[in-house]
Image (tube, rainbow, N blue to C red):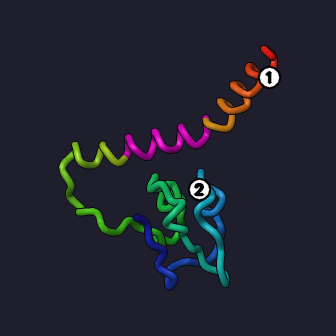
Amino acid sequence: MFHVDRNKCIGCGLCVQRCPVGAITLVEGKAVIDQGRCMGCGACAQVCPRGAISEVGVPERAPVGFRLVPALGSTLALLGRLAVPYLMDFLGGRRGGRG
């Protein structure tokens, strides 16, 4: 889970642009993360020029294996979210052509 430090956020919008799932909006000039949509990839934290976005609820020194599992899960979630619309169009087009 990622958190925005409102005291550090300057409202530049870089995190909004970088988020692959559109989980970040600007509210009253500050970034707000929709935790229900956030997939935890950390792209927002990487692009923030003020370091206003940080991961919370994760031990700082997790063993390597424990850090890889969430990264793999996030990657698979992103690929799934990006691929589903194309697969639906593809499958829908094939079924429509057979009838």
Look at the picture and state if 79 lies above or below 43.
Answer: above
Of 41 and 15, the residue lying toward us: 41
Residue found at x 54% / y 68% = 34
The residue that mark 1 highlights is: 96
Front position among marks 1 and 2: 1
Of 46 and 95, the residue lying toward us: 95
For this view, does 3 lie left or right of residue 64?
right
User: Which label sits on residue 19?
Assistant: 2
Residue at the outermost front position:
99
Residue found at x 61% / y 40% = 82
Residue found at x 30% / y 44% = 69
Crowdedness of circle 1 by 10 Å Cα count: few (<14), some, many (20+)? few
Crowdedness of circle 2 by 10 Å Cα count: few (<14), some, many (20+)? many
Q: Position of residue 17 (x, y in %)?
A: 66, 58
Residue 69 belongs to the span the image colors magenta? no
Q: Amino acid at mark 1?
A: Gly
